[in-house]
Amino acid sequence: MTEMKMTDQTFHEAMQQTEKPVLVEFWAPWCVYCRRIAPAMEKVVAQYEDKVQIGQVNID
């Protein structure tokens, strides 16, 4: 899986370093919905990693 772990400091830089469309997941460790969607996000990353840059930002 080639997802980017972004922070508020690296977010804008990461957006400018790729020519691919970017999908960013904003999540928090305490978020039940975030934990539920994690397996689906892993499938998205696996299926589209060559077409889309996937990133995660921990908002906590």
Image: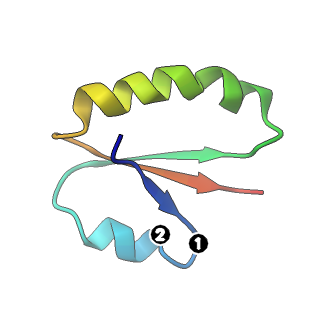
The kind of residue on which mark 1 rests is Asp
- On the image, numbered disc 1 is attached to which residue? 8
Label 1 Cα crowd, 10 Å radius (few <14 / some 14-19 / many 20+): few
- On the image, numbered disc 2 is attached to which residue? 11
Residue 50 sits in which quadrant?
top left
**Left or right: residue 8 compared with residue 29:** left
Classify mark 2: helix, strand or loop: helix
Residue 17 sits in which quadrant?
bottom left
On the image, the x and y values in percent for residue 38 come to 57, 28
Q: Residue at x 28, y 72 (%)?
A: 16
The kind of residue on which mark 2 rests is Phe
Compared to 21, does 50 lie above or below? above
Classify mark 1: helix, strand or loop: loop
Residue situated in front as seen by the camera: 31 or 5: 5
Label 2 Cα crowd, 10 Å radius (few <14 / some 14-19 / many 20+): some
- Res 40 label: none
On the image, the x and y values in percent for residue 9 come to 55, 79
Q: Residue at x 49, y 20 (%)?
A: 40
Q: Are marks 2 and 1 in contact (CB under 8 Å)?
A: yes
